[in-house]
Image (cartoon, rainbow, N blue to C red):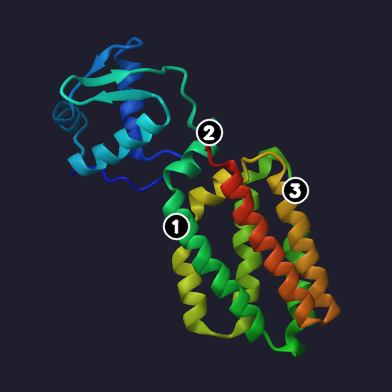
Amino acid sequence: MKKDAQTVGPYITPVVRLILDYVRAHSCGLDERLPSERQFAHLLDISRNSLREAMKTLQALGVIEIKRGSGIYLRKKDFNPHDHASLWLLIHRTEILDILTVRETLDMRAIDLVPLEKYLDVAAQLRDCLDHIDPTPSGVDALRQHDLAFHTIVRLAAGNKVLYDICNSLNGSIYDERRALFSIPGQMRRCVADHRRIMECYFSGSRDAVYQAMSDHLFGVRQAIENAMPR
C-alpha cells in the first residue's frame, strides 16, 4: 500500500521524513546525486504525486536541488524541520491565507450569534481554559490545544451547528499553521494576552468590546504569519 502525505510532524510529512531517513541511512554526501523520482517512488513504496509534493517542500527548504534533465542533488544535510517555520508558512502561503479568511469571517459571525445573557458563562469558560495553559517555549502543543479549545467555546455558544461544523472541519487544516505560528518568537505570549483580553471583554458584557478584541486578535495572527514568510 502506498504511503500518503498526511502530515504527522510540525512541518514535514511522512514522505519527507522517508526521504530524509534515506539520505541519513545511505550516508549521502553534499552535492551527491540522489535517486531519480521513479527510483525513489519504487525504493520508498510511495506514490509519484506524494513524492513530488515532498520534493517540492525539500527544494523550497534548500535540502535538495532538482535540475531538469540532470537529476536530484543533495544540498543540505543539517536540516531540522522544526527550525523552518517561516519557510513552511511560505510553502503553504495560499492555503493558509485562504483558511484564515474563512476562519476570520466565521469567528466574527460567531460573536454576533452569542446571546448577551450567555456572556458571563462564556467568560467563565474562557477563564478556565486560560488557567490551564503553559505559555512557554516547551508548551507549543499545549498552546495549540488551548487555541482550539478557546475558540471552540465561543463557537459552541453561538448555537449555530453549521458554523461550528465548518470551523471544526478546518481544525485539521490549521494544525501545522498553528505549530508554525507558535514557533515565531513572542507569538505564544501574544496569543495568550489576546485571549485574556477577549475573556475580559466577555466579562464586561459589551458585544462591541468583544468584537474589537477578537478583530484585533485575528488581525494580529494574520500579520504575524505574513511577516514570518520570507520575502
Q: Are marks 2 and 3 in contact (CB under 8 Å)?
A: no
**Residue 13: quarter of image:** top left
Q: Position of residue 26 (x, y in %)?
A: 29, 14
Q: Position of residue 196 (x, y in %)?
A: 79, 62
- Which is more toward the observer, 209 or 12? 209
Q: CA distance from mark 2 to mark 3?
A: 19 Å
Label drawn at residue 189: 3
Q: Earlier in the sequence, mark 2 or mark 3?
A: 2
Q: Which residue is mark 1?
A: 173
Instruction: Tell which residue pokes out farthest to the right in this image.
Output: 204
Q: Which residue is mark 2?
A: 82
* Kind of residue sitting beneath label 1: Ser
* Residue count near mark 1 (Cα–Cα under 10 Å), binned few <14, some 14–19, many ≥20: some
Residue at horizontal 21%, vertical 38%?
46
Q: Give the quadrant of the N terminus.
A: top left
Q: Position of residue 228 (x, y in %)?
A: 59, 42
**Residue 35: quarter of image:** top left
Please, what secondary structure does the residue beneath circle 3 have? helix
Residue at horizontal 18%, vertical 33%?
41
Residue at horizontal 25%, vertical 38%?
52
- Which is more toward the observer, 76 or 4? 76
Query: Is 208 on the left-hand or right-hand side of 179?
Result: right
